Image: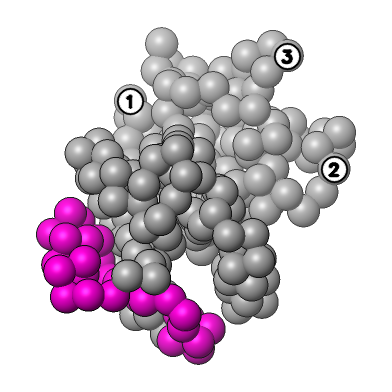
Amino acid sequence: MRLLLVEDEKKVASFIKKGLEEEGYAVDWASDGEAGLYMGLDTFYDLIILDVNLPVKSGLTVLKELRNQNITTPILLLTVRATIEDKVIGLDTGADDYLPKPFAFQELRARVRALLRRQSKTEAPVLQVADLTLDPARRIVSRGDQVIDLTAKEFALLDYLMRSKERVVTRTMIADHVWDGGFETTTNIIDVYVNYLRKKIDAGNEPKLIHTVRGVGYVLKAE
């Protein structure tokens, strides 16, 4: 699962990021509210951990703008302010949980797990582009009436492309979100997997959905 951490205190962010990565999560980090808002709007995350006191844009402003853009990702607020009034404001703005600083990592970990469990009980929406559908919950992909068998990595790549539909994604973005940056982007492994998908998704079907943007990356869209 991929999490977004928006925290301006570098030592705190490093502590949280390292701990969550040791738990098996992929964690992206933004050090100010504006960057956090951009990443929250640009990328699908399973959970966002958001500090309230941030430079550029406050955490509550980021929270409000994410909810206004219909981002329903669970959001855990972190703050040194822990009054009842502060908690009410945060929860009323759209937060799912609230954790005052300082905190023990064990408590953060427990709250993260609880929010992710709660989210998993909500049926994930089926993704669709033209006659291509992907069901994240049942992990089923089909084009028209044909069910398509994909490997785990092919499924993850297609899921990312479909969530980014009609938006060009670079090879670096794909590496970060599908492979968690675990290899040199100078290799051609991404191109190889895109070709695997093309053979399974586009071969013999119209319209073609996976398009190359020369010198940039790929986009999935119906033309």
Q: Earlier in the sequence, mark 1 or mark 2?
A: 1
Provide the secondary structure element on which disc 1 rests.
loop
Q: Nearer the viewer, residue 139 or 13?
A: 13
Provide the secondary structure element on which disc 3 rests.
loop
Q: Which residues are drawn in magenta?
A: 82-109
Decide: marks 1, 2 in contact (CB < 8 A)? Answer: no
Q: Nearer the viewer, residue 164 or 47?
A: 47
Decide: marks 2, 3 in contact (CB < 8 A)? Answer: no
Tell me if 60 is positioned left or right of 26 in this view.
left
Tag 1: amino acid: Ala
Residue 130, label in figure: 1
Q: Position of residue 212 (x, y in %)?
A: 63, 17
Q: Residue under circle 2?
A: 184
Q: Position of residue 41 (x, y in %)?
A: 39, 38
Q: Where 99 falls versus 45 (above or below)?
A: below
Q: Residue under circle 3?
A: 215
Q: Quadrant of residue 136?
A: bottom left
Residue for point 86% across, 33% down:
186
Q: Position of residue 73 (x, y in %)?
A: 32, 55
